[in-house]
């Protein structure tokens, strides 16, 4: 599939829901994309071929849609998968990181023993918006002793400037809005 065909296919499979979960937010719903094998597989293939097999030891997926994309990417890479979860969900000892949302605050966590020191980690999520979530996840991975090799997101909301908050990260997005 050509890059232009890929972008057209993905755009056609992302549904925009106005004012969800609150007024003023245009929610990017990826469930139609996930339900279409060709589109889902194209996303996973594009992420793996951007980075190249053999360059990543583990994929870290951010709850919840980052789990779906990240687990498929990890399998295709031949890499392990680590969940970055909302607070209170992981059962063993964790590192926690609080960060600002557009309204309020959130906390995410990773298991302290999730990585072997020096492992190369690819962060995966569906949407890069303000960049706060990816910045917090990258900081957790580094605290756990690993190296953040890059970050792949399905789409980037460029008007929110998330990439500028991540100057030390190689951010790869398949689509921009
Ligand atoms: P941020 O920390 O602002 O970059 O927000 C990114 C996180 O919020 C990701 O985990 C996304 O799943 C979610 N998110 C933010 N904005 C949207 C949106 N417009 N549609 C769907 N998910 C979003």
Image (spheres, rainbow, N blue to C red):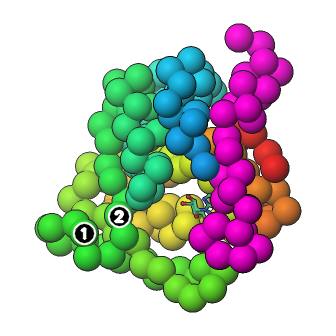
Residue 13 vs residue 129, the one in the foreground: 13
- The residue that disc 1 covers is 89
Q: Which residues are magenta?
A: 1-28
Percent across and percent down for residue 85 are: 35, 64
Is the residue 76 above or below the residue 63 in the image? above
**Numbered disc 1: secondary structure:** loop
Q: Which residue is depicted at the point 63% across and 85% down?
A: 103
Percent across and percent down for residue 156 are: 73, 51
Q: Which residue is depicted at the point 82% across and 57% down?
A: 158
In the rendered image, the residue lying farthest to the left is: 92
| Residue 166 is a magenta residue | no
**Numbered disc 2: secondary structure:** strand
Is the residue 10 above or below the residue 60 in the image? above
- The residue that disc 2 covers is 85
Q: Are marks 2 and 1 in contact (CB under 8 Å)?
A: yes
Is any atom of residue 9 visible in this view?
yes
Residues packed near mark 2 inside 10 Å, few (<14), some (14 to 19) or many (20 plus): many
Q: Quadrant of residue 63?
A: bottom left
Percent across and percent down for residue 140 are: 41, 67
């Amino acid at each position: 599939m050509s890059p232009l065909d890929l972008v057209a296919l993905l755009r056609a499979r992302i549904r925009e829901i106005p004012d969800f979960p609150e007024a003023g937010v245009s929610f990017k719903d990826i469930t139609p994309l996930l339900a279409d094998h060709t589109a889902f597989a194209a996303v996973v293939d594009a992420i793996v071929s951007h980075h190249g097999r053999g360059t990543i030891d583990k994929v870290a997926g951010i709850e919840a849609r980052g789990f779906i994309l990240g687990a498929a990417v990890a399998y295709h890479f031949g890499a392990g998968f680590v969940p970055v979860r909302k607070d209170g969900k992981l059962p063993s000892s964790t590192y926690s990181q609080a960060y600002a949302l557009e309204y309020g605050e959130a906390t995410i966590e990773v298991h302290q023993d999730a990585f072997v020191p020096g492992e190369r980690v690819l962060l995966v999520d569906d949407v890069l918006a303000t960049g706060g979530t990816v910045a917090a996840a990258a900081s957790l991975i580094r605290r756990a002793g690993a190296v953040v090799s890059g970050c792949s997101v399905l789409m980037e909301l460029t008007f929110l400037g998330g990439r500028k908050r991540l100057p030390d990260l190689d951010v790869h997005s398949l689509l921009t809005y």
